[in-house]
Amino acid sequence: MSAPAKVYVVIYTVYHHVHKLAVEVQKGLESTGVQTKMFQVQETLPESVLKNIHAPPKPDLPIIRPEQLNDADGILFGFPTRFGSMPSQVKGLLDGTGAAFAKGTLHGKFAGTFFSTGSQHGGQETTALTTIPFFTHQGMTYVPLGFPPQLNDNTEIVGGSAYGAGTIAGGDGSRSPTLKELQVAHIQGQQFGNLIRAYVRGKNAFAAEESSKQ
Ligand SMILES: Cc1cc2nc3c(=O)[nH]c(=O)nc-3n(C[C@H](O)[C@H](O)[C@H](O)COP(=O)(O)O)c2cc1C
């Protein structure tokens, strides 16, 4: 029996906007039949700082270890921007994948990204771009979102871009992901899940064909 397609959703969030998107991303993935599991990245801010910034308790999710990334066929990373870049917590996770680099265990896997920013022009696209060198160095394939119709709707503010789903939290964090932003997150999960399922199916068929020749 060949291995089923597996996708991890790996998030970092302080005020849960990214978690709300991730829930929809995961529903989209599940609709394609891939196996999926959500993780969060280890927090590095001390409790005293989290208290000062009025951070709510973290979502109830297991904390991912760098070597666990090797177990998935594809990984969708979600995180809020920090000055137009990925948060240091996420960079810390990625910097922990030296062993994977040495062994090539992330090579050939697929990755995508989704985001939250405080403001409409706060850097969703640049945040996506800060992940590309990591994926490239590891030999991973970056899977963009493209433009689902919601992203071409100019009648209201819609977070996200061709790089991935997104929401705009507001300067005080009071804005929640809108229906359209959640729809885009669902579509991203669905597109990514379909890709990974097709890829794994093809890989399994190829392996079976090769072994039948021996
Ligand atoms: C140190 C720091 C830097 C930030 N930099 C930006 C920024 O460059 N642009 C922006 O729009 N929001 C910025 N924000 C706001 C966060 O992106 C916002 O709190 C986040 O999107 C909320 O997502 P979450 O609820 O998942 O934590 C920053 C927040 C912090 C704490």
Image (cartoon, rainbow, N blue to C red):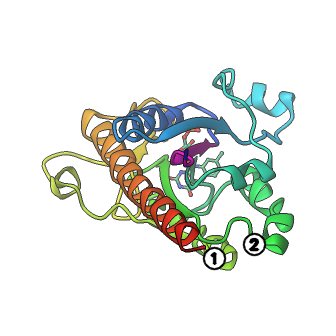
Residue at 62 percent of width and 78 percent of height:
136
Residue at 33 percent of width and 53 percent of height:
191
Label 1 crowd bin: few (<14), some (14–19), many (20+), radius 10 Å: some
Work out which quarter of the rendered image holds the C terminus and state it: bottom right
Give the labeled residue for mark 2: 104
Residue 184 within the segment the image draws in magenta: no
Drawn side of residue 47 relative to residue 34, left or right: right
The count of marks equals: 2
- Locate residue 54, reporting x and y percent: 68, 25
Q: Main secondary structure of the magenta part?
A: strand
Give the labeled residue for mark 1: 139
Circle 2: residue type: Gly
Mark 1 or mark 2: name the one nearer the start of the chain. 2
Residue 5 within the segment the image draws in magenta: yes
Image-quadrant location for residue 1: top right
Secondary element at tag 2: loop
What is the span of residues highlighted in magenta in the rendered image? 2-11
Drawn side of residue 63 relative to residue 113, left or right: right
Decide if residue 129 is in sight here.
no
